[in-house]
Amino acid sequence: MPASQQLAEVALRTGTLPDLPQGHFIDGGFRPAAAGRHMESFDPGSAAPFADFACGDADDVAAAVESARRAFENVWRDVPAAERGRVLQRAAGLIREEAARLAVVECLDSGKPLAEAEGDVRGAARAFEYYAGACDKLQGDTFPIGPGYLGYSHHEPVGVAAQIIPWNYPISTAARGIAPALAAGCAVVAKPAEQTPFTALLLAEILKRAGLPDGVCNVVTGTGAEAGAPLVAHPGIDHVTFTGSVATGIDVMKAAADNVTRVVLELGGKSPVIVLADCERERALDGVMGAIFENAGQICSAGSRLIVERSLHDGFVAELCRRAEALTLGHGLRNPQMGPVNSAAQLGRVAGFIERARGRGVAIATGGGETADPESGRGWFYQPTIVADCAAGDELVCEEVFGPVLTVQIAEDAEHALALANDSQYALVAGVYTRDFATAHRLAQRLDAGQVYINEYFAGGIEVPFGGNKKSGFGREKGLEGLLGYCRTKSVAARL
Ligand code: NAI
Ligand code: MG
């Protein structure tokens, strides 16, 4: 039996896991909250608390920022790039060695199916591997400023980088922020979501074992209001990477503005998936299902608006409904096709969207109700839901639901599909399914989105820059552009 399954059985039997990290991770070690307070983390698959963690406040944040500042100025920024790369590479190896435990912890904390958590852990290892190789390729430039002069530039680390991490992809979001920050020579203070604190703590401890000097990567746990807000407002922070809701992103940007701190905002989405009549039907069906039902739809880049060409529509949507009804639901640790949503609050938000839609007379093609783990009768589950024939401008088409809810709109042709796709306050990603590559790339040029997926939704990995336009935010993570986000350019001009 694979190691992850053995551990999963322990967790299912006991309702928790042994040896979960205790306390914040500050200055190279675990320490309790300054005020001694704790919170509970819940297992969404059973709706029961399974472990305590430190509930931090401004004092813990201050200690973490001080520790990061010291480690940045005295140690990490002067560590040779190749050595930084070795530390990151060792971290990638340790993440792989510990993959089973990391995945089971992630699964218990977030609710997602074990196979998805395992994929997220592989993605986290890849982020460290990718940026390990990039450390010593951060090259500057030279400028032709004339005979008798020398002009050049190099990339300096920006300083201490804050990472505000959401609950939907805890370890992979932590890794995609922490790895490039460390690669650039920055120190980090991360604040995981209060729903899913544990894998960020485990990651910090792994980094220490990989040889990262004490204080370079700190993790403070707690709520957004008590720990997140003081972190982003702290004058010792030089850069904030925030992933989460638009409303909180606006607060974060305002707080950062007071210190003229740079921010990267990765906010919500309402991403369209355009399916044209000449697509490869099976591929499109698989793609649309994964785009909305992976992680129970709690994905910033979920493909939540299907825009399908009229001649394909009836059979395509009927088949989607059949597949949605056949999805197995259950506790994430039993590795179903779809798990619970992450919290009671999120379940209420999703249910509210559908209740309001019913109130407007919108017909629900399939799903549309709360449910439970069929084994235990517990947990925060919502049925895979498809809402056919939605009008542009309807709340369900305009707002991010962040749950397993797909809307369907009918397009007369590719141009009409493009217009429907771009009719959104969000612009994170867009998917296109067609066999005609000229059409695909013509659409890709004109779709308002940070990234476009052609014939495979979620294609690509850490190599590909990722981020949004419009209310989906700004700045790019992943790829070499993500690394440059943690750098500032210094140019030098000299008369010889
Ligand atoms: P949120 O944006 O409030 O929380 C995300 C993170 O920000 C958490 O770590 C939280 O503790 C922290 N935070 C909250 N207030 C803060 C503040 N004032 N300063 C600094 N950090 C703060 O999102 P929430 O309430 O968990 O979810 C609400 C909605 O947000 C969801 O229904 C979904 O639509 C969206 N969301 C989008 C995500 C994405 O991947 N883009 C991820 C999570 C939520
Ligand atoms: Mg939890």
Image (cartoon, rainbow, N blue to C red):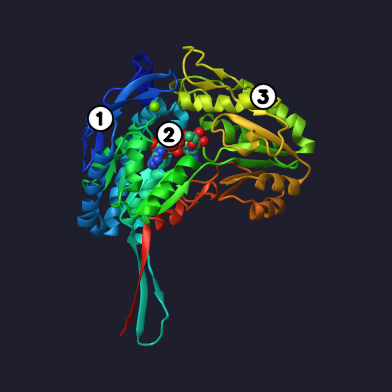
Instruction: Using a 10 Å C-alpha cutoff, classify the residue at mark 2 as few (fewer than 14 neighbours), some (14 to 19) or many (20 or more).
Output: many
The alpha-carbon separation of the residues under discs 1 and 3 comes to 46 Å
Q: Residue at x 49, y 28 (%)?
A: 346
Query: Compared to 345, does 423 lie above or below?
Result: below
Q: What SS does tag 2 mark?
A: loop
Q: Amino acid at mark 1?
A: Gln
Q: Are marks 1 and 3 in contact (CB under 8 Å)?
A: no
Residue 277 lies, in percent from the top left, at 75, 41
Residue 425 lies, in percent from the top left, at 60, 45
**Pointer 2 or 3: first along the chain:** 2
| Residue located beneath label 1 in the image | 22
| Residue located beneath label 3 in the image | 359
Q: Are marks 2 and 3 in contact (CB under 8 Å)?
A: no
Q: Is residue 298 left or right of residue 485?
A: right
Q: Give the image quarter of residue 151.
A: bottom left
- The label on residue 455 is none
